[in-house]
Amino acid sequence: MALYLHDTMRGRKVLFEPLVPGKVTMYLCGPTVYNYAHIGNARPAVVFDLLARLLRRSYALTFARNFTDVDDKINAAAAETGKPIGDITEQYIRAYVDDMGALGVQPPDIEPRATEHIAEMVTMISTLIDNGFAYEAEGHVLFDVASFDDYGKLSRRDLREMLAGARVEVAPYKRAPGDFVLWKPSTPELPGWDSPWGRGRPGWHIECSAMAEKHLGPTIDIHAGGQDLVFPHHENEVAQSACAHGGEPFAHYWLHNGFLGIDSTKMSKSLGNVLLVHDMVKTIPGEVIRLALLSAHYRQPLDWSDGTLESARRMLDRLYGAVRGIDIDTRLRREAEPHAALIAALEDDLNTPKALAEMFALARKLNKTRDDAERKSLAATLLAGGDLMGLLQDDAEAWFAHATEGELSTQAIDDLLKAREEARVNRDFARADAIRDQLSAAGITIEDGADGSRWRRSV
RNA sequence: GGCUAGGUGGCAGAGUGGUUAUGCAGCGGCCUGCAAAGCCGCGGACAUCGGUUCGAUUCCGUUCCUAGCCUCCA
């Protein structure tokens, strides 16, 4: 395979070559578990799940996605609700796994939690101090940004310019405004761990460096996350890890997904436009949300609006419609490979819109052909593509029946269809159409075919 | 103000130095008792102003606009 990925560090698309032939290590910045994940949080999870699926076709992949379960936002949530911190993080970790699962996100190989890696963080911080890259001040340990020449390279920032434009008050114990916290002291009521610098808790950035090192090694192939993490989070990770590892780079490829907006604005609590995946999956099929997230290229901004989901649902209707009613034997289904054009699109920096277009091209070919063997073969290929994309995982009949639950029972629909068939045979079209109208009012659309009628939900 | 990424047809959204994106919507046709689904066909686009070029939506520069980041926000 020739996989090309856009690397933020180099600022362009480059050929992907793993450090060790045949093996790939990938780390994705996961959620801070103080609330349910919103649709914007879901984007990196889905996008890099797709990358993981693609990589697994050709490599032995080790994929880690962390949970940040120590953070001031969590502390704030605990104070607000009166719940123990552990309950909050446990609740939202479980919800995250479920919600992402509903979007077809496969579990990563490793899901490390920050609180289970405090010792590794302390060790890394000590190394940084010992080698002159960090210093202790008033119970804090700070990374000395000036000690790392390449600081700012990932985010293309000039440190001096940033300092000039700094608009946040600089803590007095910092040597330089750009220095960032590796460790900070905790008051008795806050979570804390004993360390050489007193009881405290880690800064945000150190956890990813420490956990990636432990589970994936000092240098990893791919590090991914949301675009807003480029600075400062990933810039700081780059600095920490390189300095802790004698200058060896943290990651060879840095991937960042674009932001998701709601109706052209940022999601924010104050605007009341935060869409929680946890709520969405209650009424919307996960595949619809997944396809919507994959309908734009991952590096492009994605504007979420009312039409986004409707459009995704219709696309799935078309794909499911193509494979509906085609009986594929198990062996053909299992052995089928995705369309080469689809793989080629994904290997070009995950061009999912192109990949979807290739699926539609296949669907059209399938709808057109009269040859039964070819239909089966094309359907198997299309479904194999769906497996790779994490789509078309439902049974086609079940897909078209979904939204009807609670309105009319399947039995009732079948009875009405039967009655309509009789009417049609007797050429009593007024009655037949009346039944069709009745079903239509209940959200059911009838499709008459050469070998009988079938139905689908139309809402 | 600085940095980064963008501005494509009614909507969403790829891509390309000269030739079809794709999906939805619209229009015409086939099929159908009529529909639906499907198939065939049609229309309609590359923010602005310059430059390079035989030729630019595609390369370079200007202007305008949008989004994100600028110390803990996916």
Image (cartoon, grey):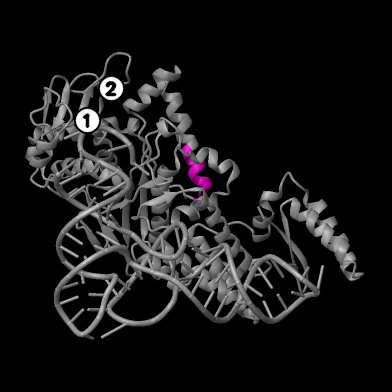
Identify which residue is drawn at 60% across, 43% down: A283
Q: Quadrant of residue A344?
A: bottom left
Magenta region: which residues?
A96-104
Left/right of residue A418 with respect to residue A170 in the rendered view: right
Residue tagged 2: A193
Asked whether the beta carbons under mark 2 and mark 1 sit within 8 Å of each other, the answer is yes
A152 vs A18, nearest the viewer: A152
Q: Is residue A141 above or below residue B24?
A: above
Residue tagged 1: A122
Left/right of residue A295 with respect to residue A452 in the rendered view: left
Is A103 magenta? The answer is yes
Residue that sits furthest to the right in the current view = A426
Residue A70, how many percent across, how many down? 33, 28
Look at label 2 and name its amino acid: Trp
Residue A263, how many percent across, how many down? 43, 46
Residue A64 circle label:
none
Left/right of residue A163 with respect to residue A212 in the rendered view: left
A217 vs A351, nearest the viewer: A351
Identify which residue is drawn at 36% across, 52% down: A301
The chain identifier of the residue carrying mark 1 reads A
A286 vs A144, nearest the viewer: A286
Residue A7, how many percent across, how many down? 25, 57
Look at label 1 and name its amino acid: Val
Q: Quadrant of residue A16?
A: bottom left
The chain identifier of the residue carrying mark 2 reads A
Work out whether residue A109 can be spotted. Answer: no
Work out whether residue A128 can be spotted. Answer: yes
Is A185 magenta? The answer is no
Q: What kind of secondary structure does the magenta stretch mostly adopt?
A: helix
